[in-house]
């Protein structure tokens, strides 16, 4: 997904690794002795904004060539995971579509569809991205009202189309930030404001779980806070690019942990769900240690297998 211009931007690697940790932590329900999992919306907002920031379309690029490369990069590792799951859990063959489609791995088909949208936007009307952002916000609002009024038990994350439009907003903002953050300061004190947005997200999430009316009705407050958080963190990273690069390149933590997690972001996302499901029953903290180790090892193996297949094409 990286273009030649942006693939070495250090702050994106740091934020992508942070997003991986947030999303993985959000899937740890049943791992911890108390219910402290959460942060998925924060991680998703960062992921989609980074994806939008990194997307680049040359004017002479052909859609099928451009799109097929990204589609293969997404679905080769996902297919390998499915084959492995069917091998160790034959009973899951009846629910493969749930795992490969819009339920467990909703991120993959969502970003595959958004790539189509972003290709034509970036190639033919990149200067009008703010209009598409506002259009997506209006569409999200209309869908939100519709699902809320027609669902017995409303949950934003339970509707793929709602998630898709939300991700459209985030990936479009990421593409817009690529231009806005090019040598400019967008927000004063972005880290402080990012922390404040994170606190607002936490309050909205807890209120939604407790089904407090204002928060349950306004689950969009969680995602609005997450988007604000992601924008602040992107601007903070851009303003501190040199310091972050120094940390990632000149420290063992940066080189061996942060950069490695960032490079394995897709693979970590794909392997964590089945591993979480199979090892949650172990006693804490043994379950957590086993899960972390297996996620790391399996992600590395999956990445190597995927690269071997892609290099043979």
Image: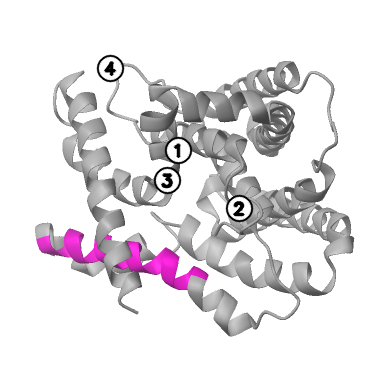
Dividing the picture into quadrants, the one containing residue 199 is top right
Residue at (85, 33) in percent of width and height = 186
Q: Earlier in the sequence, mark 3 or mark 4?
A: 4
Is 199 magenta? The answer is no
The mark nearer the N terminus, 1 or 3, is: 1
> Residues in magenta?
70-87
Asked whether the viewer can see residue 274, the reply is no
User: Is there a contact, CB below 8 Å, between mark 2 and mark 4?
Assistant: no
Tell me the tag on residue 33.
Answer: 4
Q: Which mark is first along the chain, 2 or 1? A: 1
* Residue holding disc 1: 20
The residue that label 3 is drawn on is 263
| Callout 3: SS | helix
Nearer to me, 94 or 46 = 46
Say which of 189 and 244 sits in front.
Answer: 244
How far apart are the alpha carbons under marks 3 and 2?
13 Å
Q: Nearer the viewer, mark 1 or mark 3?
A: 3
Q: Is residue 74 magenta?
A: yes
């Amino acid at each position: 997904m990286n273009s030649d211009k942006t693939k070495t931007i250090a702050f994106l690697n740091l934020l992508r690794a942070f997003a991986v940790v947030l999303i993985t932590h959000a899937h740890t329900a049943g791992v911890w002795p108390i219910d402290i999992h959460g942060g998925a919306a924060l991680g998703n907002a960062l992921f989609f904004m980074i994806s939008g920031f990194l997307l680049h379309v040359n004017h002479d690029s052909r859609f099928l060539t451009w799109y097929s490369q990204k589609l293969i990069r997404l679905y080769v590792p996902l297919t390998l995971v499915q084959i492995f799951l069917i091998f160790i859990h034959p009973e899951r063959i009846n629910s493969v579509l749930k795992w490969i489609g819009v339920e467990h791995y909703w991120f993959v088909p969502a970003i595959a569809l958004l790539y189509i949208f972003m290709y034509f936007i970036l190639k033919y009307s990149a200067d009008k991205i703010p209009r598409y952002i506002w259009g997506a916000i209006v569409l999200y609002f209309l869908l939100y009202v519709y699902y809320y009024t027609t669902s017995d038990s409303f949950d934003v994350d339970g509707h793929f189309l709602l998630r898709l439009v939300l991700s459209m907003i985030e990936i479009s903002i990421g593409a817009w930030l690529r231009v806005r953050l090019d040598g400019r300061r967008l927000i004063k004190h972005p880290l402080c404001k990012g922390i404040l947005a994170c606190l607002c997200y936490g309050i909205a999430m807890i209120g939604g779980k407790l089904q407090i009316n204002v928060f349950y009705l306004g689950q969009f407050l969680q995602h609005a806070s997450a988007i604000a958080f992601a924008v602040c963190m992107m601007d903070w990273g851009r303003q501190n690019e040199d310091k972050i690069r120094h940390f990632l390149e000149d420290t063992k933590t940066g080189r061996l942990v942060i950069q490695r997690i960032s490079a394995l972001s897709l693979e970590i996302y794909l392997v964590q769900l089945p591993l979480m499901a199979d090892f949650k029953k172990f006693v804490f903290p043994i379950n957590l240690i086993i899960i972390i180790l297996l996620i790391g090892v399996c992600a590395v193996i999956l990445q190597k297998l995927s690269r071997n297949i892609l290099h043979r094409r």
